Image (spheres, helix red, strand yellow):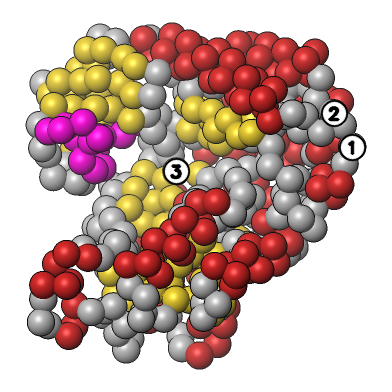
């Protein structure tokens, strides 16, 4: 058995599924971490790990990826370990120091040896299909190490993407995730854009499914925002958009090398939320970037209160070797980073709770996704991709009518009707 373990964003999980399909031509593959006790007590050779492929994410630093590597090596010291995913040089050096026998590979290297298997059923979830529409980006943000690994934008062929979606829907997927490092610049290298791709999918792929669009930088979305807004009028598109602003201060955005302004994000947030009722706005924010003053931070707080995102990924800045920000002066003390991230989380959670409370009393159709974190609960998704917690154990992929009875910052609470 070969174990493919992915971390990070949907794009990385999509690559992990491709890696698994390639390996499945010659091996049995699992996406789950092996049960050490069960393997030790089993005499079946097929249960023993042949190898591990760790499809890592280092966007927020090396700690999470190194923790997974050390755990695998500790639990299964004889098993070969291959690392794929976002692995910049500083992580590779740290990984080799921790486990000298570790090897590095990539999706492209595996594809050069074997073509991806035709079957679409080998996925982490039988009801969610991940389709990578592009790789790389058109930016070089001062804090980001991902572009050092993924490189410049490469958009995948439109017809190939449409065919992938068609196969996944035919194979029973109720949710299609279009993903990449920056979905918003899809097609800028081939003469098209994300809105045109989405419309092509909607026209050419019939069926009962919903599409979730992946992260897109605001400056790119602005170039075709009206066309993208029109796409959301189709019920097969989740009323959800992920626009990472990263800071509420134009001074900090300039230092970060972000090529949008706070107002660019503000305009888009207003456009989507005004046109569609109970729309889900998601964003990313970094606190403690070099030179960030208290005034800069307070502008970020104010932007959260003004634009009212329902999903917010808050990250404390981590200096990554090889990036322009690594040697920037005016470093912010770790104690201030922790304080600001805690304050911002409190502001965001209050906003998210108030947003979710507006759903109380609504009756709607949801589709179950997975077992809830609380015992004997199930998580579903509504039309705005909000997580909906329902009491009981309900199989994934089940469509049902519910009434929203309560709200928390990170989920709606519901009862079946």
Which residue lies at the image location 15% right of the left edge and 33% below the top edge? 375
Residue 151 image offset from top left, x and y in percent: 73, 64
- Name the residue beneath numbered marker 2: 291
Left or right: 271 as drawn, with respect to 122 = right
Q: Residue at x 31, y 34 (%)?
A: 381
Q: Position of residue 52 (x, y in %)?
A: 39, 74
What residue range appears in magenta? 367-383
Q: Which mark is residue 212?
A: 3
Q: Of tags 2 and 3, which is closer to the observer?
A: 2
Q: Counting residues from the N terminus, which is met first, the one under dot 1 or under dot 2?
A: 2
Q: CA distance from mark 3 to mark 1?
A: 39 Å
Q: Which residue is disc 1 drawn over? A: 329
In three-dimensional space, the C-alpha distance between marks 1 and 2, rounded to whole angstroms, equals: 7 Å
Do the CB atoms of the residues marked 1 and 2 lie less than 8 Å apart? yes
Residue at (32, 89) in percent of width and height = 26
Asked if residue 47 can be seen in this view, the reply is yes
Quarter of the image with the C terminus in it: top left
Label 2 and label 3: CA atoms lie apart by: 35 Å
Most foreground residue, 195 or 294: 294
The spot of residue 80 in percent (x, y) is 41, 81
Q: Is residue 290 left or right of residue 129?
A: right
**Residue at point 13%, 27% (across, down):** 391
Callout 3 secondary element: strand
Asked if residue 312 is among those painted magenta in the image, a careful observer would answer no
For residue 330, above or below residue 344: below
For the residue labelled by badge 2, is the local secondary structure a helix, a strand or a loop?
loop
Taking the image as shown, residue 200 lies to the left or right of residue 388, namely right
Decide which of 142, 402 is in the foreground and name it.
Answer: 142
């Amino acid at each position: 058995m070969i174990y493919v373990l992915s971390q990070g964003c949907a794009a990385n999980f999509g690559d992990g599924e491709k890696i698994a399909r390639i390996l499945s031509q010659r091996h049995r593959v699992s996406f789950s971490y092996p049960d050490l006790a069960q393997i030790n007590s089993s005499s079946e050779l097929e249960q023993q790990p042949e190898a591990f492929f760790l499809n890592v994410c280092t966007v927020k630093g090396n700690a999470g990826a190194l923790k997974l590597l050390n755990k695998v090596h500790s639990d299964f010291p004889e098993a070969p370990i291959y690392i794929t995913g976002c692995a910049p040089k500083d992580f590779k050096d740290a990984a080799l120091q921790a486990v000298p026998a570790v090897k590095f590979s990539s999706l492209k290297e595996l594809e050069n040896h074997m073509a991806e298997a035709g079957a679409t059923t080998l996925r982490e979830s039988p009801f969610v299909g991940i389709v990578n529409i592009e790789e790389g980006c058109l930016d070089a943000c001062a804090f980001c190490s991902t572009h050092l690994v993924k490189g410049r934008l490469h958009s995948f062929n439109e017809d190939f993407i449409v065919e992938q979606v068609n196969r996944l829907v035919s194979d029973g997927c109720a949710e299609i995730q279009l993903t990449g490092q920056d979905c918003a610049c899809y097609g800028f290298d081939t003469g098209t854009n994300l809105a045109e791709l989405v419309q092509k999918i909607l026209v050419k792929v019939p069926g009962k499914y919903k599409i979730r669009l992946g992260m897109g930088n605001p400056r790119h979305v602005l170039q075709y925002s009206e066309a993208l807004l029109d796409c959301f009028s189709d019920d097969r598109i989740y009323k959800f958009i992920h626009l990472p602003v990263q800071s509420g201060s134009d001074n900090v955005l300039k230092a970060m090398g972000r090529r949008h302004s706070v107002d660019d994000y503000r305009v888009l947030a207003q456009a989507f939320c005004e046109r569609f009722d109970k729309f889900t706005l998601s964003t990313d924010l970094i606190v403690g970037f070099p030179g960030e003053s208290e005034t800069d931070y307070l502008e970020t707080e104010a932007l959260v209160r003004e634009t009212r995102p329902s999903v917010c990924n808050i990250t404390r800045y981590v200096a990554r070797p090889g990036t322009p920000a690594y040697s920037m002066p005016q470093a912010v003390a770790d104690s201030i980073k922790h304080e600001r991230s805690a304050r911002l989380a409190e502001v965001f959670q209050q906003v998210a709770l108030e947003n979710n409370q507006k759903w109380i009393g609504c009756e709607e159709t949801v589709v179950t996704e997975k077992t809830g974190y609380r015992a004997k609960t199930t998580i579903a998704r509504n039309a705005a991709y909000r997580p909906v917690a329902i009491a009981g154990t309900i199989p994934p992929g089940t469509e049902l009518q519910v009434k929203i009875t309560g709200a928390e910052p990170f989920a709606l609470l519901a009862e079946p009707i």
